[in-house]
Amino acid sequence: MGLLNRVKVNTTTTGTGTVTLGSGVAPYQTWTNAGAVDGEGYPYLIEDGTDWELGFGLYTASGTTLTRVLRESSTGSLLNLSGSATVSCVAQKGGSVHVAQVTGQNAGGVTASFQPRGLNTVISNTIAGATAVPSSVVTITIATPGVVTWTAHGLANGTAVMISTTGALPTGLTPDFPYYVVNATTNTFQLSLTVGGAAIATSGSQSGTHTAFAALFTLPAGTYEVEGEYAGIFSGVAGWRSRLFNVTDGVEQAGTIGSSSAGNVNAYRTMTVKGRFTITAAKTFCIQTVCTGAVATFGMGTSAGAGGVASVFTNTILKQVA
């Protein structure tokens, strides 16, 4: 995302769509004169009378136009422009999201592909428009397999989910244990111990209120600096990586390099990842880990002799800088 100095122009655009950038407001520059780059994203301020809108837009030299992705405004939504507004390029105060993830010892076992391995816990969130850890009260059938109902959940197959309860879950399910969504429909899904694995059958009885949490969080458009600490345990020749994955676009946003511990059985390792990225619209993310260890009954490559350690922790801090 770019920034431009001393930019403020008029716009005759009406409505809530893309704005056409007009003549400069003296003594400021136009977007073109300030060196705006075709296809680049810029933070903007629109002022229309006493109303204002802060957001992020993509600049198009032919036109010249600027798209609008809302960050915040005086009305709480995109302004319905009157035709007499001004558009400036301004730096905007950012915030941060601190996401911690705990991965259970048996959370999925060994896998050759990246998977979300646990539940995200949002320690803090000061980014306007960021949404973290979607959750909902759910119902679960006693059936083979058991079916979870969560209206319009939006979860894809393979999403990590945990379920807490004020009472007791059906036999076959453990509270606050990471499961994976399979056979998802608009309002329902089933649970598996592994990604793409067999759906779990439920039996017995249940009580209380059940709440499901998904290992996802959403960031609004902007530029972010990411700093993460990913700790793990190696087992023999096990190797592992962790990464921040952009679920919406299906791309790795930041991640650690691969490693192995053939000469250092059961050793702890910590990897630090730092990076910077820009997204032009709201995107959904998760933290994923891959483990290629040979001890399938101990998730994340934890071996039987690892001192009783049962969990792996990650910390990710995302700072919005523009």
Image (cartoon, grey):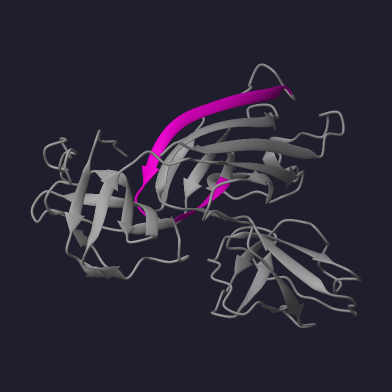
Q: Is residue 90 placed above or below 167 in the rendered structure? A: above
- In the depicted view, which residue is nearer to us: 186 or 7? 7
Going by the picture, which residue comes out furthest to the left? 62
- 82 on left or right of 135: left
Check if residue 236 falls in the magenta segment. Answer: no
Q: Is residue 66 placed above or below 318 in the rendered structure? A: below
What stretch of residues is rendered in magenta?
267-287
The location of residue 161, given as percent across then percent down, is 67, 61
Report which quarter residue 36 is drawn in: top left
Quarter in which the C terminus is drawn = top left
The location of residue 35, given as percent across then percent down, is 15, 35
Q: Determine the residue positioned at 28% across, 68% down.
A: 81
Q: Determine the residue positioned at 68% across, 40% down.
A: 300
- 57 on left or right of 219: left
Evaluate whether residue 239 shows in this view: no
- 271 on left or right of 45: right
Q: Determine the residue positioned at 56% across, 67% down.
A: 155
